[in-house]
Image (cartoon, helix red, strand yellow):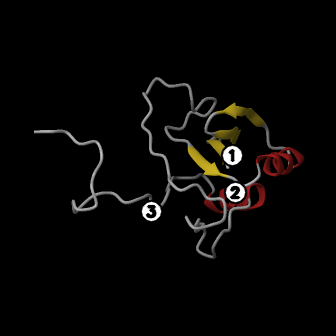
Amino acid sequence: MANSSKATSAEPGHVTGVGGIFFKAKDPKALAAWYRDMLGMPMESWGGAMLHYDAPKHPPMLVWNAFPASTDYFAPSTASFMINFAVDDMDAILARLQARGVTIVRRDDADANGRFAWILDPEGNKIELWQPKP
């Protein structure tokens, strides 16, 4: 039997995209406010954000990748996950974050896939910011 790494649209019962990102927080309201105020997330009255795929400059896909348990890519966070947010203007968002006292863990403007930066939210979760190449 052949092993296909790509599901076809003719095959029923397959994943078509990410419907949400859910995680536990010590103080969900305060963390939502931080994401709203620091990253410009459009928070809804129910406490979460609706990020639309058809937004201007949104990348055409979402990357899913399982890392080895031994990876240090999420460091200094000890969480078992990391969220990557696409951004429209890396310089503008980093300037706003620095002005508000958020530490930029690292920045990489030389990657073939675009510009990257990493920060920590108030609960120590590492966040990857990505400005795709035009």
Q: Which mark is residue 35?
A: 2
Mark 1 vs mark 2, CA separation in Å: 8 Å
Residue that carries the numbered disc 1 in the rendered image: 121
Q: Which mark is residue 19?
A: 3
Residue 82: x and y in percent read 55, 42
Mark 1 vs mark 3, CA separation in Å: 22 Å
Name the side, left or right, on which 47 lies relative to 102: left
Residue in view at x 60 percent, y 66 percent: 49
Q: Tell me the crowding category of disc 1: few under 14, some 14 to 19, or many 20 or more residues within 10 angstroms, Cα based.
A: some
Name the side, left or right, on which 79 lies relative to 37: left
Of badges 1 and 3, the one in the foreground is 3
Residue in view at x 69 percent, y 57 percent: 35
Classify mark 2: helix, strand or loop: helix
Q: From the viewer's perspective, is residue 27 above or below residue 97? A: below
Residue type (three-letter) at the residue carrying disc 2: Tyr
Classify mark 1: helix, strand or loop: loop
Classify mark 3: helix, strand or loop: loop
Decide which of tag 2 and tag 3 comes sooner along the chain: 3
Q: Tell me the crowding category of disc 3: few under 14, some 14 to 19, or many 20 or more residues within 10 angstroms, Cα based.
A: few
Residue occupying the far bottom of the picture: 45
Q: From the viewer's perspective, is residue 104 above or below residue 63? A: above
Decide which of tag 1 and tag 3 comes sooner along the chain: 3
